[in-house]
Image: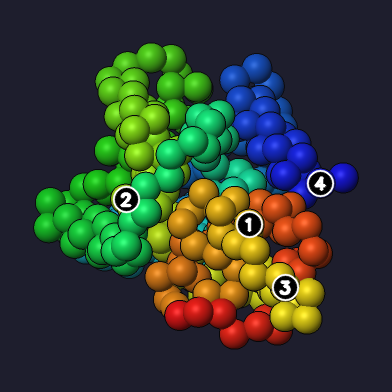
Amino acid sequence: MKIKVIRKILQIFFLVLLLLPIWYTDLIWYGTYISADLMGLQLTDPLTALEITLAGKSLWVPLLLSALPLALAAILLGRVFCSFVCPLNFLLELIPLKRKKNIREKNLPLLALVITLLLSFIISLPVFNIVSPVFALQRLLLFGGGVEIVLLVLAVGAGLIWGPKIWCRTLCPLGALYGLLGVKRLLRVKVEESKCTQCGKCAAACSMGTAPGRRSLADRVLCTNCGDCIGACEAGAVTFGMSEKKEGKP
């Protein structure tokens, strides 16, 4: 089975999981991808935990501990939340990949992360939770329509103009944080040099504007380990592995 098919199945699974508490409250899972309870284990996404900590200007140990499982997952597997779980990513991938503006400045997501955390500290509010189309979509699905629709229209509209993942590639601080945590991830996309034909199909398939083997910090942060580049490589040179065999372009 192709990696992209497996990824779509998992995306649908996690979307259904998100919606289940609407009808069934007595589950092993209850909550959203902001904060949830999994069989008694409290989970909070790392950016939310950081924002609340900075906004409240105090350390709450249980909150930080609840962010550790997802942070550890990112350290080991990289930015897989974006490619396999995020409901907004699932929505944006419905937009045909006909336009993909080449963003030369790849550090924009890291800049968005810094600005988000600084604003949370200054105005004492979790900024991303308020203006994020990622969480807006979750609230819309769970609680119905509201002003969240504006955020989604902007994200989808930008995707139609500049490419489906323009939000993810330039502005999403949550993805940037997961990517930063996963810079030294255990599971990564590797390129087998002996099989590589330099056809460029892997780079063309990447909706995040990077390519397997690139080692710069920005490129590592952008990669979501989605596997689209693997499916595009007809030579079988691109695979998942525990290490890189090719030193790519910086």
Circle number at residue 201: 1
Q: Nearer the viewer, residue 79 or 92?
A: 92
> Which residue type does callout 4 highlight?
Lys
Per the model, the C-alpha gap separating discs 1 and 4 is 16 Å
Per the model, the C-alpha gap separating discs 1 and 2 is 26 Å
Residue furthest to the left: 122
Instruction: Please state which of the two labelled residues, at mark 3 or mark 2, is closer to the viewer.
Output: 3
Verify CB contact (< 8 Å) between mark 4 and mark 3: no
Verify CB contact (< 8 Å) between mark 1 and mark 2: no
First reached walking from the N terminus: tag 1 or tag 3 = 3
Tag 1's secondary structure? helix
For disc 2, the marked residue is: 171
Q: Residues within 10 Å of mark 4 (few under 14, many from 20)?
A: few
> Which residue type does callout 2 highlight?
Leu
Q: Nearer the viewer, residue 192 or 188?
A: 192
Q: Residue at x 42, y 63 (%)?
A: 177
For disc 3, the marked residue is: 196
For disc 4, the marked residue is: 2
Residue 65 in the image, given as x and y percentages of width and height: 51, 65
| Quarter occupied by the N terminus | top right
First reached walking from the N terminus: tag 3 or tag 2 = 2
Verify CB contact (< 8 Å) between mark 2 and mark 4: no
Verify CB contact (< 8 Å) between mark 1 and mark 3: no
Per the model, the C-alpha gap separating discs 1 and 3 is 11 Å
The quadrant in which residue 64 appears is bottom left
> Which residue type does callout 3 highlight?
Cys
- Above or below for 33 versus 237: above
- How is the rendered protein coloured? rainbow
